Amino acid sequence: MTPVGLGLGPLGRRLLLAFVLVAVSSVLVLTGAAVIGVDRGVQVAEQADREQIAAAAAAAAADAYRRDGGWDRADLSRAIAIADAAPARLSVLDLDGNMVQTSGSGGGRPNGQGMGQGAGMSQNVVTAPILSDGGQVGTVRVNFGAMAGTRVVDVAWSWIAMAAVVALIVALGASWLVTRLLVRPIRRMTDAARSFTAGDRESRAAGPGPGELGELAVAFNGMADAVVRSDRDRRNLTADVAHELRTPLAALQAGLEELRDGLVQPTPEGLAGLHDQSLRLGRVVADLAELSAVETAGLSMRLSTVDLAQIARDESALREPQLRAADLNLTVDPGGPAFVRADADRLHQAVGNLLANSARYCRPGDGVALTVTLEHGQAVLRVADSGPGIPPDELPHVFDRLWRGRAAEQVAGSGIGLALVREIVSSHGGTIEATSVPGEGTIISIRLPVTAAPAG
């Protein structure tokens, strides 16, 4: 079955090939290391055994030399028996290097061939000194013939080869399984992305994924949800803007057609009504332009260290006539300095919109309180009123564009003021929230990170 038949695409084939190469290389390296290690271990162990046999033969020859008083009558049968048991060929030399006796058994070479002095002549020949009464009286040379360790290496090689084959099969299976686990969620996300791009807005990456791939699938689904919400908000915004513009345009059109056709005579009252509709139309357009400008304010904001408490004092002084005209009681408690890193003009705009919103929705005689406090490393500005409050089902939407709620028919406005405030606060790295109890009032809270006071 080919990799494509196994459900692997180009990436899966490359991953599988990479895993297979790593697995084969690892098995080959480990197999070679095992063979070399066994061979070296067998050689070391065999050499140690040979040296012990040579030392035992030398000790037996030394006992015969002492017992029989020299090499002429020495009985070396015990030393020869030790060599024959190896099996090996034994040669006994006197101190001058003359041959005293050689064994007639073992797998060694003929006498005199390859029997040079020292252990370095052949890997199969081991020499040992014959010591008697503290001095050397001769040398034994043991020729072990062919290496018996070769048979051990051959057996070890067969087992290592079998283990290598098994390990390679397991590694290939594991490589294929891991490749499948990695490729499957990627293919699912690819299919979902293609379907989403083709217009299926309900397409999502389904199924779990290992580790970061699972997180990527969750992030992809979140991105798809955000795109769907953005499309929905865009359609709603288009519909809301069309609705907001349609009413004043229709009134203007009808009034101007009546004047053009002579159905009514121009009067100050009629012209004032048409002027009010044009002002409403201009106000909606200006608010939309201002909202668009604020949404890109991150590119044009002039940031500096400003005192939020001072901004609250200044803006409340500017808005006090408007609040007084609406018969509202304004109290201001800015507290001590609260320095933030912000665009002062934008913050003035945000505070002014909150106070204007209170003037628009509160009832005559209601109170409006503006406070600034420091809480947990944040500067908190609150505008609290004792107005009619916001119904619980409308509270989550108060910062949406063009949202005016059920009070839209009684209160003039475009529904963009609080959306502007949210964009301004967000562009400064702050947060804004609204809490309300119907019939008791509303509290709008702005939180901004505190910064150090300016030097001097």
Image (cartoon, rainbow, N blue to C red):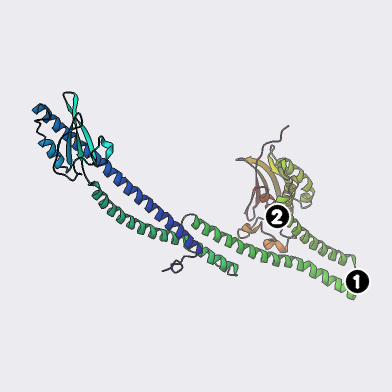
Q: Is residue 417 above or below residue 104?
A: below
Of 254 and 288, nearer the camera is: 288
In the picture, the disc for residue 90 is none
Pointer 2 with pointer 1, Cβ within 8 A:
no
Residue sitting at x 79%, y 63%: 281
What amino acid type should be assigned to the residue bearing mark 2?
Glu
Query: Pointer 2: what residue?
Result: 295
Q: Residues within 10 Å of mark 1 (few under 14, many from 20)?
A: few
Residue 390 percent across, percent down from the top left: 65, 57
Query: Pointer 1: what residue?
Result: 265
Q: Is residue 94 above or below residue 157?
A: above
Q: Is residue 228 above or below residue 322?
A: below
What amino acid type should be assigned to the residue bearing mark 1?
Gln
Q: Residues within 10 Å of mark 2 (few under 14, many from 20)?
A: some
Q: Which image quarter holds the N terminus?
A: bottom left
Residue sitting at x 60%, y 58%: 392
Left or right for 35, reference 449:
left
The mark nearer the N terminus, 2 or 1, is 1
Q: Which image quarter holds the C terminus?
A: top right
Residue 446 percent across, percent down from the top left: 66, 47
Mark 1 element type: loop
Of 24 and 114, nearer the camera is: 114
Residue 135 shows in this picture: yes
Q: Quadrant of residue 265?
A: bottom right
